Amino acid sequence: MPIRIRGGDRIALWLHRRRRALPHRPVARPCGCGDRARRGDAPPSTRVTPMGARVGGLVTRLGLVLVLLACSPAEPVDYEGHGRLVGIDRRHRALEIDHDAIPGFMQAMTMTFDVAPGVDLESLEPDTPVDFTLHSQGRSLTVTAIRPVASD
């Protein structure tokens, strides 16, 4: 006698065949923990109460807010620096400066900085001591002002 399959049974049969065809995928099987927790006879560590679910959701949301605050861009800050102009790339509007330590921001090093559009690069020459203003916003560092100074 042929087996008659109804709509819901077809889906169950299809899922059963898929599970056999793909043994490397874990199969979710009901363990009954939820039923036991609702009845109250589950061990205390596995009980999920409505209050526990609310607290867990609150902790998750609070953690998400803290992560978003930590990843948000910092407020823009301007720093004053002194150094020696090593190289000028007028085409790409960049300066390489061997600068002294900038207190509260970075140690002394040689670094290439982008230059703001309003800064005049034509009057600058390599190997010149300079004072400069560095604008920091997030991860972006831009020289917004630069002035040649008398030799050290």
Image (cartoon, rainbow, N blue to C red):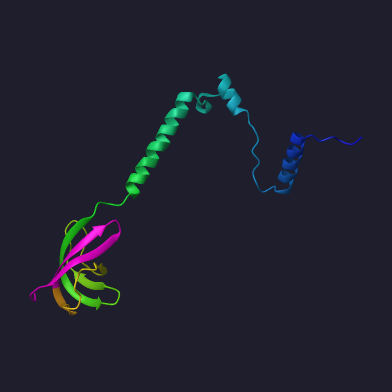
Question: Foreground residue, 108 or 112?
Answer: 112
Residue found at the far right of this picture: 1
Q: Is residue 98 left or right of residue 152?
A: right
Where residue 92 sits, quadrant-wise, is bottom left
Q: Residue at x 21, y 66 (%)?
A: 143
Q: Residue at x 86, y 35 (%)?
A: 3
Q: Is residue 52 left or right of residue 86?
A: right
Where residue 88 sits, quadrant-wise, is bottom left
Q: Residue at x 20, y 63 (%)?
A: 134
The magenta segment is 130-152
Q: Main secondary structure of the magenta part?
A: strand
Taking the magenta stretch, the answer to whether it contains residue 137 is yes
Q: Position of residue 54 (x, y in %)?
A: 44, 28
Q: Position of residue 125 (x, y in %)?
A: 17, 80
Q: Is residue 55 above or below residue 124?
A: above
Q: Position of residue 121 (x, y in %)?
A: 20, 75
Residue found at the far front of this picture: 118
Q: Position of residue 77 (x, y in %)?
A: 21, 55
Q: Is residue 82 above or below residue 44?
A: below
Taking the magenta stretch, the answer to whether it contains residue 84 is no
Q: Is residue 138 left or right of residue 118?
A: right
Q: How many marks?
A: 0
Q: Assign the N terminus to one quadrant of the image.
A: top right
Where residue 30 sits, quadrant-wise, is top right
Residue found at the far top of this picture: 40
Q: Is residue 137 visible?
A: yes
Q: Is residue 41 visible?
A: no
Q: Assign the C terminus to one quadrant of the image.
A: bottom left
